[in-house]
């Protein structure tokens, strides 16, 4: 049975997915205003950090940025896989439950108060995202916490956050508004090494928890009643998955702003290539999500170099057609 063509094809795709982060890393390091050949890039990496301009660009600018892109892309993809399984909705993405609205509100509140620190803005975004998650779950818990209730509560909290966000932008000075809009479009240029360390620890912890829950995710995709009949504590399991996926999204948004469509598109691609089992879907989504965002960031830095397009614009241009395809396939409804 393992020699069947479909299994051979899956393992081939699996090997390619495992190699994708390395390929994407080289693309991200080589692309930009100063483009480098594979030979030159390899030579600079082997030399290690130094004072030459190429070494400074690669080791101090592009490498932290590539690591941030990999972190954010993996976190969003893991959140997307989880929310789509928990909510049993193929159109669910990490921002559906009001996380983006809460994070944006927290970050813009810090910016409009004159707090432009690279530490305070991500921290404010993180607190805002977790606050939104708490409100969504608080509302949903009062109504049996079904999947539909979670979605409706997320839309409500997101709408409230959007209204408050518009009010803050209306009241903010011009410079603060410009900075806020740049952050809202997705920004990977402020890759702080200290934040990267904490972000990667957060990602690895979240990944291990979700991977350990992969069988439970498989059960939830079969329906809540079926999962309960098979002995799963649906309420407790959903809470764990909801908190972990939401915290991963909050981390990604706090570090890089709003970058859409990664958590929507990547899980679907991995399902098409490998299948629905979350035991493999979770690691492959993390690998492909990180690789996708590294390549998208390379495109954002290259198209109009030395100017830079917000990476959120690139992911939206790549992801929006796929989203419309899914929406049409679902017949226009959630």
Image (tube, grey):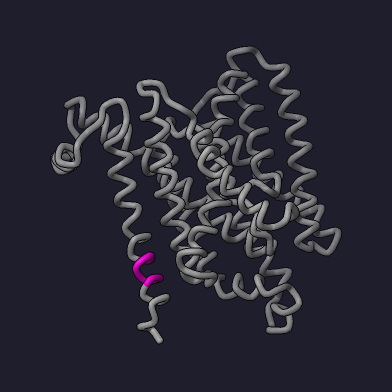
Q: Quadrant of the C terminus?
A: bottom right
Q: Residue at x 58, y 18 (%)?
A: 178
Using the rendered image of the protein, determine whether residue 254 is visible from the camera's viewpoint. Answer: no
Q: Choose top left, top right, bottom left or bottom right for residue 106.
A: top right
Q: Is residue 251 magenta?
A: no
Against 135, residue 28 (above or below) is above
Using the rendered image of the protein, determine whether residue 115 is visible from the camera's viewpoint. Answer: yes
Between 139 and 87, the one nearer to me in the picture:
87
Q: Main secondary structure of the magenta part?
A: helix
Q: Residue at x 70, y 44 (%)?
A: 98
Q: Choose top left, top right, bottom left or bottom right for residue 162.
A: top right
Please identify the residue farthest to the right as the structure is shown: 143
Measuring from the top left, give residue 133's x and y in whole percent. Answer: 70, 49
Q: Residue at x 32, y 30 (%)?
A: 32
Between 194 and 267, the one nearer to me in the picture:
267
Q: Which residues are magenta?
A: 9-14
Against 218, residue 177 (above or below) is above
Direction from residue 56 to residue 228 in the image, left or right: right
């Amino acid at each position: 049975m393992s020699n069947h063509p479909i299994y051979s094809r899956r393992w081939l795709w699996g090997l390619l997915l495992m190699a994708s982060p390395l390929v994407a890393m080289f693309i991200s390091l080589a692309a930009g205003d100063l483009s480098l050949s594979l030979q030159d890039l390899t030579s600079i990496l082997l030399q290690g950090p130094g004072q030459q301009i190429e070494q400074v660009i690669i080791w101090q600018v592009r490498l932290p940025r590539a690591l941030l892109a990999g972190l954010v892309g993996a976190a969003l993809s893991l959140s997307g896989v989880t929310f789509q399984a928990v909510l049993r909705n193929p159109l669910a993405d990490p921002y559906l439950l009001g996380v983006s609205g809460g994070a944006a509100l927290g970050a813009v509140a810090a910016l409009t108060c004159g707090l432009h620190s690279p530490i305070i803005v991500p921290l404010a975004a993180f607190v805002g995202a977790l606050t939104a998650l708490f409100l969504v779950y608080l509302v949903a818990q009062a109504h049996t916490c079904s999947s539909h209730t979670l979605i409706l509560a997320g839309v409500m909290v997101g709408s409230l956050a959007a209204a408050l966000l518009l009010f803050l932008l209306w009241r903010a000075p011009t410079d603060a508004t410009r900075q806020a809009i740049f952050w809202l479009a997705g920004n990977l240029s402020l890759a702080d090494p200290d934040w990267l360390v904490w972000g990667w620890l957060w990602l690895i912890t979240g990944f291990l928890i979700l991977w350990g829950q992969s069988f439970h995710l498989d059960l939830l995709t079969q329906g809540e009643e079926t999962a309960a009949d098979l002995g799963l504590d649906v309420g407790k399991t959903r809470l764990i998955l909801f908190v972990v996926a939401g915290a991963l999204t909050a981390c990604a948004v706090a570090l890089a702003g709003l970058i859409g469509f990664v958590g929507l598109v990547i899980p679907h691609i991995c399902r098409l290539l490998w299948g629905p089992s979350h035991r493999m879907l979770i690691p492959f989504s993390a690998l492909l999500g990180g690789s996708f965002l590294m390549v998208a960031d390379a495109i954002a830095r290259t198209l109009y170099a030395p100017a830079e397009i917000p990476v959120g614009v690139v992911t939206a241009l790549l992801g929006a057609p796929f989203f419309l395809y899914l929406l049409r396939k679902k017949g226009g409804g959630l």
